[in-house]
Image (cartoon, grey):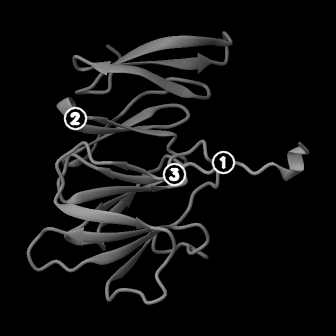
């Protein structure tokens, strides 16, 4: 088949509710024609946010908090980067990732959000026993806890971090070293992010 005629497979959005959460969320196939009364765009200053944006209808469980539409700007249109929603160690917080751009949204006050500096995030991995949501980037790993960013690792790779195992309080993985042109193993203490 002619490569120009091949269609690239689009992976379905991920829904990972590993942590207890105080909300319900639904990923919509497109922006609704009639917007709900509460609509939030992340980040606020995004241009042409509707192009490929992740549209999530969020229904917080908190008393008196109305549902809202979260429009999350697309990072990259590449099936290698994640898109979806994750629960976080903080029950009222939702993590929405759109083409590798990660947004942590307070569902009780959706105007409060954090956009992670990793652009793109390449993998999201819940470490439930450590109460951390781990974000893997090209060079390092960021850990998110109940109070926000817990730690950010040192540079683990010149290009491409692979997490191989998370258990007994230790995260293990591999990173490619430019100087040696080899995959190098690493181990991080989940409490501190320091090499174990």
Q: Looking at the picture, how far across and down is residue 126, in whole percent?
A: 31, 37
In the image, is 154 to the left or to the right of 180? Answer: left
Question: Of the numbered discs in the image, which one, if any, rests on residue 12?
Answer: 3
Q: Relative to 186, is 91 above or below?
A: below
Q: Name the residue under label 2.
A: 128
- Please tell me which residue lies in front, 192 or 83: 83
Callout 1: SS: loop
Q: Relative to 66, is 182 above or below?
A: above
Q: Looking at the picture, how far across and down is residue 146, in whole percent?
A: 19, 47
Q: Distance between the residues labelled 3 and 1?
A: 9 Å
Q: Name the residue rendered at 91%, 45% in the picture.
A: 2
**Neighbour tally class for label 2: few under 14, some 14-19, many 20 plus, Cα within 10 Å:** few
Q: Earlier in the sequence, mark 2 or mark 3?
A: 3
Callout 2: SS: helix
Q: Name the residue rendered at 29%, 58% in the picture.
A: 94
- Please tell me which residue lies in front, 184 or 82: 82
Q: Mark 1 points at which residue?
A: 9
């Amino acid at each position: 088949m002619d490569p120009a005629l091949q269609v690239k497979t689009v992976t379905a959005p991920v829904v990972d509710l590993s942590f207890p959460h105080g909300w319900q969320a639904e990923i919509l196939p497109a922006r609704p024609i009639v917007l709900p009364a509460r609509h939030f765009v992340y980040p606020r200053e995004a241009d042409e946010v509707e192009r490929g944006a992740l549209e999530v209808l969020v229904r917080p469980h908190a008393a008196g908090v109305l549902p809202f539409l979260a429009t999350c700007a697309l990072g990259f249109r590449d099936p290698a980067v994640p898109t979806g929603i994750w629960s976080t160690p903080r029950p009222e917080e939702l993590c929405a990732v759109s083409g590798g751009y990660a947004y942590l949204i307070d569902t009780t006050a959706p105007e409060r959000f954090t956009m992670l500096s990793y652009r793109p995030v390449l993998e999201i991995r819940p470490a439930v026993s450590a109460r951390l949501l781990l974000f893997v980037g090209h060079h390092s790993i960021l850990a998110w806890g109940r109070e926000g960013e817990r730690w950010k690792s040192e540079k683990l790779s010149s290009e491409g971090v692979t997490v191989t195992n998370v258990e007994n309080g230790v995260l293990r993985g591999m990173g490619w070293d430019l100087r040696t042109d080899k995959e190098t193993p690493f181990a991080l203490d989940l409490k501190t992010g320091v090499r174990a």
